[in-house]
């Protein structure tokens, strides 16, 4: 029997890595095609691994009947599992054929599927071992404090290093994306800084909850304090924080998990389970604020597609949500940040902004009363624009005209401080010396010198 130390020594000799592997799997595949393999998961990703992601795929050493055929055979596993190291020894592959012929071999395709399944199974085992350790910690209350001081579970370390690979796998491998979806981890509004899987989220859901709610954003602080999740967190509903740019693409590949639909809290038509009485109250509010919404939409013009009463706000006056099938604010930000991309090339995908208002907020109530009394003027227009621009910022959109926004803010500050005018009294500026006089003097001196030289030349000739 092979000891663990021998596996570790073999890994170091094979990869020239100075650290132990995080996990390994030694297996023999038998049946239609037989081969033996050892697969290793490194502890750390190589420097610049994702910068060179598309330059080469896996690097497994291929042996045929214990004869080395290739040092880095790239066709065994998909690109997203390129971090896995190891060796494969086959009895069924031809020994004396070219690489091109080998790539077309049916045997190779079967081996590739089996190796991919084994690699994913190895990662799944790591995740399950981590979950079992957590359950043991909960049962043993006496040693709970000691366990907290110990190092984090092995799978959490792995996901920190290679989590992007699993997300890329969901996008690239339609065959195994359901298996990979169970391996990705996220922080949530209830996880207290820990990363949990979507499976655990579903298990923790109340019976009345019908969707997996998620929010995408630039970073954890931005989504944690976002107005989009105010009411959900008040109701005790867990929200998944998706702050990796890849998550925007992952969601398109897995619209549901284990039959439970994923729902973005930043898009229109947010569905929240509520009682019939609450639905009736919401319906009355929508009817009451419908004329005000039309008045507000008219004031904002083309900046918004429509104005609606929100079912997701608690403390914020308003927020900008996007259409169900277009880009989110976060996706629009990602597309604009592409080095060689052109966000203007797909105008139909740009976020169509819908202003949702909080009918219980004092600002909205006051604005509605002024709209009902037909109050008009520059002040009302400025209030509406300032409210819209603050909603842009809190919803993840950039302000369209920072100078106008700053001017409006300065006007509000001036009014509160009792400053009547923001005009600055400036003294006349002294113009810079042009240097024309000095140039004229130099030209005159040069002309005098030339005249003197000409006179002396004439005298010499005489």
Image (cartoon, grey):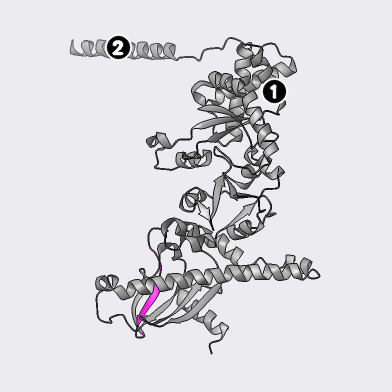
Residue at x 67%, y 15% (from the top left corner):
370
Q: On the image, numbered disc 2 is attached to which residue?
A: 452
Q: Residue at x 66, y 43 (%)?
A: 232
In the image, the segment drawn in magenta is 54-66
Residue 433, relative to residue 14: is it above or below? above
Task: Return the mark for residue 365.
Answer: 1
- Residue 211 is situated, as x and y percent measured from the top left of the image, at 59, 49
Give the crowd class for mark 2: few <14, some 14-19, many >=20 residues within 10 Å: few
In the rendered image, residue 58 lying in the magenta stretch gets the answer yes
Q: Position of residue 109 (x, y in %)?
A: 34, 71
Residue at (18% x, 10% y) in the render: 462
Residue 232 colored magenta?
no
Q: Is residue 374 above or below residue 84?
A: above
Report the residue at 55% width, 49% height from top: 262
Instruction: Note whether residue 42 is visible.
Output: no
Q: Which dot marks residue 160?
A: none
């Amino acid at each position: 029997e092979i000891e663990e130390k021998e596996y570790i020594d073999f890994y170091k000799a094979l990869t020239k890595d100075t650290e132990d592997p995080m996990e390994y799997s030694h297996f023999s595949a038998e049946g239609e095609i037989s081969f033996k393999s050892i697969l290793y998961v490194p502890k750390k990703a190589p420097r610049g691994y994702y910068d060179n992601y598309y330059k080469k795929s896996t690097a497994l050493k291929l042996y045929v009947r214990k004869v080395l055929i290739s040092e880095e055979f790239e066709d065994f596993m998909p690109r997203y599992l390129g971090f896995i190291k190891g060796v494969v020894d086959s009895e069924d592959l031809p020994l004396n054929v070219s690489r091109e012929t080998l790539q077309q071999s049916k045997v190779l395709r079967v081996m590739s599927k089996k190796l991919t399944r084994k690699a994913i199974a190895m990662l799944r085992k790591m995740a399950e071992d981590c979950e079992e350790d957590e359950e043991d910690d909960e049962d043993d209350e006496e040693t709970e404090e000691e366990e907290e001081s110990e190092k984090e579970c092995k799978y959490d370390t792995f996901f920190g290093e290679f989590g992007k690979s699993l997300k890329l796998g969901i996008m690239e491998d339609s065959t195994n994306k359901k298996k990979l979806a169970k391996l990705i981890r996220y922080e949530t509004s209830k996880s207290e800084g820990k990363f949990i899987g979507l499976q655990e989220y579903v298990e923790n859901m109340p019976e009345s909850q019908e969707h997996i709610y998620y929010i995408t954003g630039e970073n954890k602080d931005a989504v944690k304090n976002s107005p989009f999740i105010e009411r959900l967190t008040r109701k005790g509903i867990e929200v998944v924080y998706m702050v990796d740019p890849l998550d925007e693409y992952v969601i398109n590949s897995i619209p549901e998990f284990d039959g439970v639909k994923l729902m973005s809290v930043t898009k229109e038509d947010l569905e929240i389970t509520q009682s019939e009485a609450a639905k009736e109250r919401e319906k009355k509010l929508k009817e009451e604020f419908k004329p005000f919404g039309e008045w507000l939409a008219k004031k904002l013009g083309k900046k918004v597609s429509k104005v609606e009463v929100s079912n997701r706000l608690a403390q914020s006056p308003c927020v900008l949500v996007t259409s169900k099938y277009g880009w989110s604010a976060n996706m629009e930000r990602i597309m604009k940040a592409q080095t060689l991309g052109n966000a203007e090339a797909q105008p139909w995908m740009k976020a169509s902004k819908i202003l949702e208002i909080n009918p219980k907020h004092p600002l909205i109530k006051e604005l509605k009363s002024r709209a009902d009394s037909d109050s008009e003027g520059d002040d009302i227009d400025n209030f509406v624009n300032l409210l819209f621009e603050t909603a842009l910022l809190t919803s993840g959109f950039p302000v369209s005209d920072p100078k106008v926004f700053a001017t409006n803010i300065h006007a509000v500050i001036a009014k509160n401080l009792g400053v009547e005018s923001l005009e600055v009294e400036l003294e006349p500026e002294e113009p810079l010396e042009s240097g024309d006089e000095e140039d004229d003097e130099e030209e005159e001196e040069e002309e005098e010198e030339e005249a003197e030289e000409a006179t002396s030349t004439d005298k010499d000739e005489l």
